[in-house]
Structure formats: C-alpha cells, structure tokens
Amino acid sequence: MKIIIDAMGGDHAPKAPVEGAMKAVKAFPDLEIVLVGNEQEIKKHLEYNDRISILHTEETILPTDEPVRAVRRKKNASMVLAAQAVSDGQADACISAGNTGALMASGLFVVGRIEGIERPALAPTLPTLEGDGFLLLDVGANADARPEHLLQFAIMGSIYAEKVRGINRPRLGLLNIGTEDKKGNELTKAAFTLLKEADLNFVGNVEARDLLEGVADVVVTDGFTGNMVLKTVEGTALSIFKMLKEALTSNFKSKLAAAVLKPELVKIKNKLDYSEYGGAGLFGLKAPVIKAHGSSDANAIFNAIRQAKIMVEHKVADTIRESISKNGQGE
C-alpha cells in the first residue's frame, strides 16, 4: 500500500509530516510513503528508510491562497501533485494538513467524486466523554445542503463508522434544535423522513449539547452548521484547558495541586484531543483524501496515516459506491 503526503502543508511542515511518516513505516511493515515537497527541506528531518521516497517540488499552496484558483494555477504544488498521484493510481490515498479549501478542490477536481454522490462531505471524528468519539458530517465542504445530501452523508458516515471504527450498526443522529420528530426547519424535517425510511440505524434528532455524551456514533448536518459546531467544540476545549492552566499556576498551593493532578489532567486532555482519531475524511471521492488539522504534530499525522490505511484496506470508497448505487441515490 502506498500513501502520499503533502509534506509542505500545515503549521509544522515539513517536520511534522516527515516525523509522522517515519513513525508510520515503523508501525506498518506493508506501508510505503511518498513525501511531496522541497527535497532539501524534507531531508533535514528524514532518517533514511527504503519505504519512504520524496517527490520534489518547490511550489506550495499557501493558507492565504484562494482555493480553486490555487489548484488550477499551481499544477506543481505539493498538495495538487499528491492528489494527482492518487488519481493516476500511483498512490492509494493522500493526506495534507494544508489549506482546507484547496484540498477539497483538489479532491473534487483531481481525484474526482464517486458516481452518484451529489456532494462530498468533510467529516472529522470528534471526542466524547467516554472516549469512543463520534463522526460529524458535513463540517464545511458544503455550506448549504438538501435533504438528499444529508441522506448520502448518513450512508457514507455509517459505512465509515462500521468499516474503519469497527462499530456494528452505528447509531445515526440528525443534528437538530430538539429531539422531537417534528422539530427543525424545512431541511431537517424533510431529512428526518428520508433517514427514517432508509436502511440505517437512525436514532432520531439529537441536540448539540448531547454530542459529547456520545448520543450517536454518526451525526449529520449541513456544512454551515457542522462547521460552527466543530469550531465551538474546539474553542471550548482550548478555553477550558487555558483556564485550568491559569488556575493551577496562580500560586504556590495551586502549583502543588497541579503536580498531583497532572497525570489525570493529561488523560483528560488526550481524551478530548480529536487528532487521536486521525484527520477529517473527505467522503464521496474515488479514493481516500484526509485533511489533517493545520496544527498537526507528528502524532496527529501518524494517526491520519493510520486512518487512511484502514480506509484503503477496508475499501471504504468502493463500499460507498456500491451502497449509493444499490440505494438508487445520485443525480
């Protein structure tokens, strides 16, 4: 299996992608990795391994670049070359921690959609209090959505949860403003009917306040709402840990308490760290494309590689294609 990584994407590139790749080839003997980017910069962090190769390019897509224009004009950018390798069959999956919009554009225009998928969905696995996590889709690939799109998101998310996360008959929830069947706007009301009639383990409407309690394994919503939820969860977690740090370092007594509590606080921090689950998958494409968080360290990149590897092994894209075809979904 070969996975290609945009080594120049992310806040800590190329160090984090390179170190994550080295960790991955040590963990997975059947894995080959191609790092795309400036060879001279990559080699500063790379220990020789015959299962890691470099595809040199000096062109990159910047966080400030307009996504679609950048993908069309920067044909030799590290992210675009990674997507092209997947499209050409030279790699089984690609990963980038770079410009999210550009990666989505690369996925759509270079890798391509699965036939029958109207809209792809960007889907991270977010933490829950018991540590199992839940898949949220869409979180920004589409600002608007139709009920049929939410049904396709539900099918794709359920397949991923079963194949990659090993959940038998994953519980599916529709994000809404209340749990009653008739709650919501026109989109959620129509989507509720479609999801209830589908061959899915639909548990009904779920509220945002219950997400971290693990109320469902897969939660679907439109990209605008999903992105708001994602950023709220991320911001809340960061703010809580910042307040805890300030409180536990404010005086000598609190510092002593912090020393005692540190092991337990680390456990809590790790439980709430969604990078432990991998990156956000761009579902609905012909091959796995993973968006790692922009601030990913080596461990987060390693988890994204592991995620991509499992998706390839379990043929998630093929299963989605077959399921969409069987259910008569599509344009």
Image: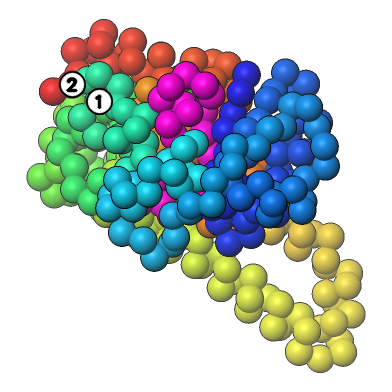
Relative to 38, say whether 83 is above or below: above
Q: Residue at x 74, y 48 (%)?
A: 43
**Of 203 and 308, the residue lying toward us:** 308
Characterize the local packing of mark 1: few (<14), some (14-19) or many (20 or more) Cα atoms within 10 angstroms.
Answer: many
Instruction: Give the secondary structure at mark 2.
Output: loop
Q: Please, what is the three-letter code of the amino acid marked with disc 1? A: Ile
Instruction: Kindly identify which numbered label has been placed on residue 117.
Output: 1
Range covered by the magenta-colored residues = 83-104
| Label 2: how many Cα within 10 Å (few below 14, some 14–19, many 20+) | some
SS at mark 1?
Answer: loop
Q: How is the image coloured?
A: rainbow
Q: Is residue 311 left or right of residue 302?
A: left
Q: Which mark is residue 246?
A: none
The residue sitting at 37% across, 36% down in the picture is 107
Q: Quadrant of residue 130?
A: top right
Q: Identify residue type, mark 2.
A: Gly
Q: Is residue 61 visible?
A: yes
Q: Nearer the viewer, residue 293 or 229?
A: 293
- Quarter that holds the N terminus: top right
Q: Position of residue 133 (x, y in %)?
A: 55, 41
Disc 2: which residue:
330
| Position of residue 229 measured from the top left corner of the image (x, y, whole percent) | 38, 57
Residue at horizontal 75 percent and vertical 30 percent from the top: 25
In the visual, does 170 lie left or right of 176?
A: right
> Mark 1 near mark 2, Cβ–Cβ under 8 Å?
yes
